[in-house]
Image: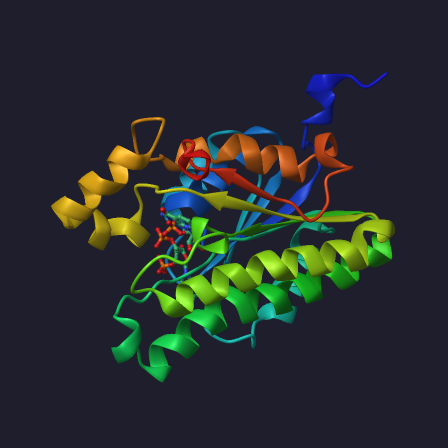
Amino acid sequence: MNNVPQLFDLTDKISIVTGANTGIGQGIALALAQAGASIAAVGRSSMDETRALVEATGAQFHEIRADLATIAPTASIVEETLKTFGGLDILVNNAGIIRRNDAVDFTEEDWDAVIDTNLKSAFFLSQAAGKHMIASGQGKIINIASLLSFQGGIRIPSYTASKSGLAGITRLLACEWAAKGVNVNAIAPGYFVTNNTTALREDQDRSAQILARIPAGRWGDPSDIGGAAVFLASRASDYVHGTVLPVDGGWLAR
Ligand code: NAP
């Protein structure tokens, strides 16, 4: 018989969270830390705020400065985590960007930048982490997908392609690695109040249209994601593979 609180306990687990300085990544790092995990926080900006939040929980924190616009740092991120904490159990591919323009005007630069960060780096960081996880017979990878993993959207062609691709890669890695003890899943946040949605929220008409469609009647807060992340990072999800879990206030149900 399983002890349910212990199923969600992440004590002694080592995690990497990309883009952990702000927004959803910060919310996830804090939730994993509250469940007991050590946090290797990866990003290109200062992680001081996240460090303070994580260390206040009593969890260990290590900052890794890396620019995920290319895959150059992916192997060394895993090596540095292993060297610092002596293991790696959880990878959260959260770092991501968005570029907005009409499809007819969309540039190759805006296409490549988004695909490289959101999809290519997430895959190759998963590959680097997966090698270690497969060798140790266990691991949890969580990709931060989007409603645009399910829907088309407008004016964000490379973002929709990247998040639809990330859902596909989540399923592919799950099929290859499930029998090796590695769970690969994704979370699809709905509309959250972060830097990613500043432009949307500043457009009053669009912002009101979005809010009217959310059954929960409010935008998401980064703290709304933590429970799903802890679930997918913990033993509670040991038989969950290749799913994309919406945390969207009911958006997709409408
Ligand atoms: P955010 O506050 O803009 O966070 C994005 C994070 O990714 C930041 O930490 C950012 O670092 C990091 N990042 C971007 N490019 C990077 C690079 N080249 N190298 C390293 N780190 C990089 O927005 P967010 O909403 O929390 O986004 C987090 C994830 O959630 C993204 O994958 C996004 O697509 C996804 N998402 C968001 C929503 C939403 O409504 N907000 C909905 C669905 C999915 P800097 O601060 O240094 O730029």
Q: Quadrant of the N terminus?
A: top right
Which residue lies at the image location 61% right of the left edge and 41% below the top edge? 38
The percent coordinates of residue 157 (x first, y second) are 38, 68
Q: Is residue 192 visible?
A: yes
Quadrant of the image where one finds ligand 1: bottom left
Which residue lies at the image location 78% right of the left edge and 56% below the top edge? 175
In the image, farthest residue toward the front: 254
The percent coordinates of residue 149 (x first, y second) are 50, 54
Q: Nearer the viewer, residue 72 or 112?
A: 112
Which residue lies at the image location 46% right of the left edge and 50% below the top edge? 146
Image quadrant where residue 61 sits:
top right
Residue 156 as seen in the image, left or right of residue 202: right
Q: Nearer the viewer, residue 57 or 234?
A: 234
Residue 128 as seen in the image, left or right of residue 218: right
Residue 232 vertical placement versus 118 (above, below): above
Q: Nearer the viewer, residue 55 or 154?
A: 154
